[in-house]
Image (tube, rainbow, N blue to C red):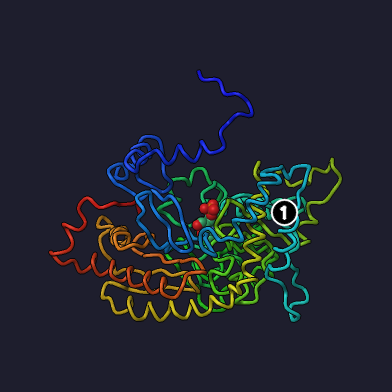
Amino acid sequence: MQAVALGRLDPTACADTLAVMTTAELSDADRRVLWHPFTQHQGWEDELAPIIERGQGTTIYDTDGTAYIDGVSSLWCNIHGHRHPHIDAAIHAQVDRISHSTMLGLSHPPAIELAQRLVEIAPSPSPDQPKREPLTRVFYSDSGSTAVEIALKMAFQSFAQNGQQQRSSFICLRDAYHGDTIGSVSVGGIDLFHSLYRPLLFDAWQADSGDAGSMAELLEQHGHNVAAVIVEPLIQGAAGMLVHPPGYLKRVRELCDAHGVLMICDEVATGFGRTGRMFACEHEGVVPDLLCLAKGITGGYLPLAATLATESVYRSFLGEHEDYRTFFHGHTYTGNPLACAAAIASLEVFEQERTLERVQTTIALLVDYLDHYVKPLGAVAEIRRVGLMTGIALSDSPARERLGHQVTLAARRRGAIVRPLGDVIVLMPPLSISDSELEQLVRISADAIAEVTQPSPATTGAEQAGQPSAQA
Ligand SMILES: Cc1ncc(COP(=O)(O)O)c(C=O)c1O
């Protein structure tokens, strides 16, 4: 065993290790030691997925130097592009102070400053909603799933310690996706992901998506036993960009109030400008009792999540130490200072670059490009979209053909990373995408759909053989 002299580590050594591995060696090691999320490894191990080494703006580069447009914002989280100088600098500056310090029994400036800012920008009651409470308390965690898990536990515990123990169940939406931990899966409605785990889950009633009548009926029947209704506001991302009818969210808010049920809005995907407003709830003037944030919160740089609560929810946890009304929950990396510094910097970029104003033009262009390039394609059944969140649904085909997957491979060969949700092609570019990059992304997606759904003998078989691939 080699002895390492303390204080003598070469600070450049770590960067060199990566540089000496070739793409082939990295791929080989990937297949030997990694287990990728949402991936059937039986196929994956024969495939060559790009290994991303760096990014700049909307472009990511693999270890061979091939450039791709990041058409899904690195799984729906990048906001201002990769290597944004302001966010990079904020993280570097925080590294020079401290990279991690616990929030249990201690606090730190980035967590405090970010919480203040989140409370300021959170959906808030308008003057005609005098009884509605603002969101005033921020509880940190580290992923969308944990933000949801926390909201569910808060809702349950809040009622339990206020004499309403019978309010122990939840209502969610059919085809909902709120993450992969046991609690968030319990309020999930995507059978493909969730049905196997049913024996491990708690029961939740499922209302039909976007159907206020179905929600009203469930609340009528079970409202007295329900702690909270949880919804993805306006658009259910992982369900394949399922858009709710206008007014639905507002109606759900009214129904929750009528039945004394808390409303949890999961803005993990929709938050931070993705729908054209900072938060999707703002489109309908809705203020939930609990708000779940993650993904874009750090501009897509580091794992961080926040669950925002009203003062009433917060106060229901106050009591003497021996009352045990404490919220017994907290992750090791809760409120990590580097992540909080990145999140503050991202919010500063929103202000400095007038991101929300500028994204309106980007959204309008996206509509034009989708109309021009995608809509005319025979294989496109529907385009579903709110803001920059876009799902291109392909016409029905046998599942084994994996058309969505094939389209993403074809797009990748043309220089864009897009992801399938079954046979729905998802486009969700960073808010900072330039007009020309956006046109290129939509054109590539359209060409990829055309290639896969109208194959010509000259291009398909040969072009597809031996090409890099990824899992749906
Ligand atoms: C609406 C919603 N909630 C929660 C999650 C889970 O977030 P994470 O993957 O960070 O746990 C996701 C992820 O896509 C999501 O779309």
Residue 139: image x %, image y %? 70, 53
Along the line of sight, the residue nearer the viewer: 426 or 162 = 426
Residue 3: image x %, image y %? 55, 20
Does label 1 point to a residue whose CB lies under 8 Å from ligand 1?
Answer: no
* Up-down relation of residue 162 to residue 330 (above or below): below
Residue 259: image x %, image y %? 68, 67
The reply to whether residue 180 is in sight is yes
Task: Please name the residue shown 74% across and 42% down the image.
Answer: 104
Residue 430: image x %, image y %? 49, 66
Q: For the image shown, how many numbered marks are present on the structure? A: 1
Q: Amino acid at mark 1?
A: Pro
* Up-down relation of residue 444 to residue 304 (above or below): below
Along the line of sight, the residue nearer the viewer: 210 or 362 = 362
Q: Which residue is mark 1?
A: 110
* Up-down relation of residue 31 to residue 402 (above or below): above
The reply to whether residue 187 is in sight is no
Q: Residue furthest left?
A: 457
Task: Please name the residue shown 78% across and 61% down the image.
Answer: 311
Q: Residue furthest right?
A: 320
Quadrant (top left, top right, bottom left, bottom right) of the C terminus: bottom left
Residue 383 lies in quadrant: bottom left
Task: Please name the residue shown 51% across and 36% down the image.
Answer: 13
Along the line of sight, the residue nearer the viewer: 347 or 269 = 347
Task: Please name the residue shown 48% across and 47% down the image.
Answer: 198
Q: Is residue 391 left or right of residue 223?
A: left
Q: Is residue 371 left or right of residue 152?
A: left
How many other residues sit within 10 Å of disc 1, few (<14), some (14-19) or many (≥20)? many
Q: Is residue 253 left or right of residue 410?
A: right
Q: Callout 1: helix, strand or loop? A: helix
Q: Residue furthest top?
A: 1
